Image (spheres, grey):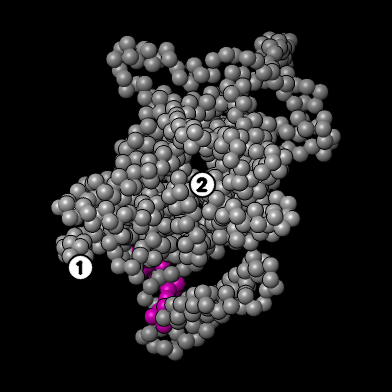
Amino acid sequence: MKFRTFAWFVGPSVLMMLLFIAFPLVSVFLQSFQVTQPVVETVEVETCTPGFVGQTCVTETKTTPVLDANGNPVTTTEWVGLLSYTRLLQFDQVGAAIASGAFSSILAIDFWKALRFTLTFTLVTLPLVIGLGLAIALAVNNAARSVRGQIIFVSLLPFIITPVIGALSIRWLFYGDGIVTALLEDMLATDISVAANGWAIEFLMMFYRVWHVAPFAFVIFYAGLQTVNQDTLESAIIDGASRFERLRFVVVPHLMPLIIFVALIHLMDAYRAFEEVVGFSSQAHRITLQWLTYDLLTPDDAGNRAISRASASAMLTMIGIVILLIPLLRRTWRDHKGSAR
Amino acid sequence: MATAKAMQQPFSLRFASASFLTLWCLIAAFPIVWIAVMSFKSPVDAFSANPLNVVFGPATRADGNGLSLLDIAVGLAVLVGAGRIAFTQLPRWVARFTPKGLIVVGWLVGAGAFAAAFLLVFFGLLPPVLAVLNSIAGPLGTPIIGLTAEHYYAVWVENQFWRNFQNSLIVTAGVVTVSLTVGTLAGYGLARSGSNLAFWILIVALVFRALPHSVLVAGYLPVFINSAEILRPILGENAPTLYGQPLAVIAVLVAINQPFTIWMLRSFFQNIPNELDEAARVDGCTHFQAFRWVIMPVMWPGVITTGLFSFLLAYNDLLVTSLLLDAQNQTMVPAIAGYFNRETTTTDQVEAVAAAVSITAPLFLLVMVFQRQIVSGLTAGAVKG
């Protein structure tokens, strides 16, 4: 294919990605070093109120925003270097916390709290998703052919459902006097308040994520199981391998590329978890990195959006993603060089 | 067959595996089924701590909203009948009445007409007929399960959820059309070119796929809010403010979706033998003609599968739509996020449940119709590397 034809085919897509992905990235990078503020001036205002003998006059200095000809506030943008980052990371407080040995007070700072939760969330759900996905795939592979279609249909539901709604549907089972909570209260004869307990919410968020992603892992592993070499399995049996050994030494190695694929996709997606915080209304207890950026971007009570701090938080989130992706990119690069040779 | 016997599993293992599957299916379906049940009950029943009350809804029944055995039997019969017609007769009618080449339009019209007819029969015709039947059926006609659609009425009509539905429709339709058009071209180009440039485009796309969407939105927001001033020198007085415009959101979602789309379509195109376009080229087609008249006709399954995933992304998105759309243009998912934040009374909560079920219902239908394509789409990317 000639380069011109190739360019015509790929052009529109590349243009869109440049305009709506690459360009915003650059602008976020720049914004994170800038602060845009309304210009304010201090004015002396003399207010007089009629009094008994004469007027009582009070002179005050007030700060008021400068307005332009159209009555809009004038804003300036200055370069502030790493100010937004330091505001987000609050190293002085972290240092003080470490010096005084009160490590838990580090987690009172939004960014560190979000980082702690996001990492725990990602790393705890990863083995659960892969394990559960593999277990379902093996069990479905065992099941009678006639019911497989229905099982796949039911399994796809948690995967396909809108993430917020999925989180909500689990929340309604537990929050307040949800039926599962009521059942637990009956069994344990205690009062349980899920919505007020940070760890309970954290557990529910992880449960939701595993429930939501395991079907994806299952479908992929199930497809992989169909191509397991039957001859190898038979020779393993002749060699006297037990059922577990066959699984361990024949099936799992065969599925390894797929397991890595699922793990990578899950790492990427769990790292940018966001809907869980909205669905479980957990912002008082647990927040994620992407939710932190979102929160900074939503207008506060005065209608201001903390764009520069949001950009800084976005850049920090991205650094995490890049670290996660480096092994994958190195492998792809090796494959590409290997195939070129 | 010694090996076959050796492969046979002991009863205990088969039993364990079957019970595990049953348990999984229960866990997978239960939350979704449960919110569907809750949405039809009066608030007292829906949030009752006793599951039996939630299912049978005594308070709802006491309000005079209930289904008798007869209602349930007739309703189920109509549902099953409609399902059978949809899967056996409808494809035949569509095939017979649509001219060749317009099969997609034919399906859209057919499905729309069928849905309208079903709604008319189920909600327009059945209730009055059953009311008469119930009054003469005696014990069979007395209500046993409480059920009310008042929350759906409140959500869709009083709270004007149909506006959000309309916006969702606009955004998803736009995203699917544009991203498929742009993506098929790019996917074909990338699959047929072995150049280093193609490789690098794919790698960069992979990195883009991993980006948190909030990073991108942080880049759009200031530009979109001030776009009128930025674009004024170019477009003059008519420069639009992009913030709040569905069109801008469509463009953003298409771009976010593009990396995934081109990877998936590329893997589908690679399955189509290169000899096919070479034959067309020998016959004197240009690359574009070969693409349009030879490759596209065999590409439909791949395009439909990718379209499904584009649809899911646009339909399920919360972050982009909630930050870039204002209140009038809000789609369904951010609208419901607003719902449960203001939940104060239990009635509000059940309305939120009803809205949630309304959002889920189309997805449910989607899995029913396109299960095979979804599975093939999930595996297409993974199994072939």
Observer able to see residue A163: no
Does residue A11 appear left or right of residue B57 in this picture? right
In the rendered image, the quadrant that contains the N terminus of chain A is top right
What residue appears at the point 45 percent right and 32 percent down from the top-left corner?
Answer: A334
**Is residue A211 shown above or below B156?**
above
What mark, if any, has residue B185 been given in the picture?
Answer: none
| Magenta span | B54-72
Q: Position of residue B107 (x, y in %)?
A: 62, 69
> Which label number is shown at residue B1?
1
Q: Which chain letter matches label 2?
A: B
Query: Whole-Å distance between the Cαs marked 2 and 1?
Result: 60 Å
- The residue that label 2 is drawn on is B337
Q: Nearer the viewer, residue A276 or B60?
A: A276
Q: Is residue B70 magenta?
A: yes
The three-letter amino acid code for the residue at tag 2 is Ala
Q: Is residue B95 visible?
A: yes
